[in-house]
Image (cartoon, helix red, strand yellow):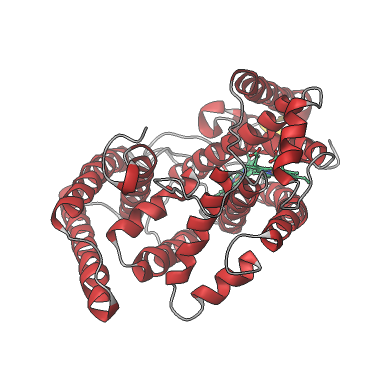
Amino acid sequence: MLHFRPVYVPERSLDLSLHWGLGIMATVLIFLLFASGLMLKFTYEPSLSSAHDSVNYLIDTVPFGQLLRNLHRWSANGLLMVVFLHFLRVFYTGAFIAPRQVNWIVGLVLFAAVVLSNFTGYLLPWDQLAYWAVTISTSMLDYIPVAGPGLREWILGGTEPGPKTLVNFYAIHTALLPALLLFFVPFHFWRIRKAKGLVIKTTPGAEPAASGDMVEAMPHLFMREAAIALVTLAAVLLVSMLYNAPLGELANPGLSPNPTKAPWYFMGIQEMLIHFHPVFALLVIPGLLVLGLLSIPYINYEATAPGVWFHSVKGRKMVLTAAVFAAVATAGMVWLDDHLAAGYQAGPAGLVRNGLLPFAILLAVSAVFYLALRKIFKANNYEMVQAMFTLIVTSFVVLTVIGVWFRGAGMQLGWAA
Ligand code: HEM
Ligand code: HEM
């Protein structure tokens, strides 16, 4: 441990109310996924004729097979949530500012690897849920002009999910992405060391906190990490003992469920597709968001406050305002669009009516909000970026919630059974 981790750490960086142990929880879940994933490989068979049977065999015949599958499945879902919360904590404590900007980018790569691991794993049991979720998710690619259909065929190894898709996803899931994680997680840790540890928590308006006294990592850091690891393991084990991972009927390409939904972490995008032309829902908006996320650490801020939750007292109020505004406006716009707009229009007219026009409305609403907030709060750059980030993240969460829980048969608004 001491070769890989620091021997001494700043005592003040051990404060749980700064990092909430989320990074360690994510690391523990990745360990658990590797351990359970390697065990699953002993029974899982990546072929159309036996994938579903092999999962059934695992559940019915292998001692603790069901528990093993549950552990893998619930850790995977838990990891998504924990990484998302870790990403929020890093952002809202200003921990992406130099010298940590590279680690923010590494974090984004890790985030993508975790989402893709979940997505590729989801197909492997080859049940109805998996088959149709992957069909709907990859069919979204078709809408991307020029490269879309080719990209979809390349990923699927054919025009629809089939034997090659399973082999592709299996290789990506159990070799490529694990290799990526094995490289980038230690790299992430190394960058933390290079930055001389975590940001130190301090209060709004105070001078940036000094690191203070150093203490030995053993026992001070490692005991805390061990405690967080045990709590995480206990939580996943408990959930795995109480709830079985769902397994539907064998995939049937001729019978699509209604509604056909993507996995929950893609439902925000699927919901966006209901309201925007695919070029905007899949290319323009996500493209701009990724560019925005990558550039966050490189914006020129006139004031920064690493270690202060929400930057300042004013920042805190602005984040709350943005979150409430985004939640109400997003839900309102979804409802309005569902009731007023009459479906898609084909061709270039559709691109204007379902794409450019709603996108322009979105930009206009955001711009008015931005200017009003800047004026009312007399905010600095940093506080504005924080508020706009909150606006976007909240909207995305609301879209996801609507997609998962409020879209029933035919993707109509209502309570999803
Ligand atoms: C971040 C890491 C990982 C994530 C998020 C993840 C996620 C998932 C998910 C969501 C499933 C579908 C589970 C189900 O429906 O039962 C799955 C299945 C599977 N995973 Fe992983 N996994 C990860 C790492 C690994 C690793 C490292 C291996 C092995 C080297 C592995 C091997 C498998 C196998 C063999 C299955 C099919 C068995 C089954 O579906 O029950 N996974 N994974
Ligand atoms: C597989 C996913 C990830 C793992 C295993 C991981 C692990 C960790 C750990 C253990 C820490 C130190 C303790 C803590 O802050 O809780 C940390 C810090 C950090 N992480 Fe992550 N992380 C992941 C994803 C991300 C993401 C998505 C981002 C942001 C885009 C990110 C950015 C950072 C930064 C900037 C720090 C330094 C924070 C500071 O100095 O206070 N990480 N990460």
In the displayed structure, does residue 355 sit left or right of residue 304? Answer: left
Quadrant location of residue 155?
bottom right
x 70%, y 59%: residue: 163
Residue 382 image position (x, y, % from top left): 36, 54
Q: Position of residue 60 (x, y in %)?
A: 74, 26
Residue 160 lies, with reference to residue 262, above or below; the image says below
Q: Is residue 376 above or below residue 212?
A: below
Q: Nearer the viewer, residue 203 or 187?
A: 187
Residue 56, by quadrant, is top right
Q: Is residue 58 above or below residue 400?
A: above
Q: Residue at x 20, y 71 (%)?
A: 353
Q: Is residue 249 visible?
A: yes
Total of numbered circles in the picture? 0
Quadrant including the N terminus: top right
Instruction: Say which residue appears at 48% left-offset and 56% top-offset.
Output: 136
Q: Nearer the viewer, residue 52 or 394?
A: 52
Residue with the most extreme left position: 340
Residue 314 in picture, x, y percent from top left: 27, 41
Q: Nearer the viewer, residue 364 or 267?
A: 267
The image quadrant where one finds ligand 1 is top right
Q: Where, quadrant-wise, is the C terminus in this rendering?
A: top left
Side (left or right) of 336 relative to 310: left
Which residue is situated farthest in the front direction here?
Answer: 254
The picture places residue 130, in percent across and down from the top left corner, at 57, 47
Please tell me which residue is depicted at 28% across the width and 38% down the height of the picture.
320
Residue 6 visible in the snapshot: no
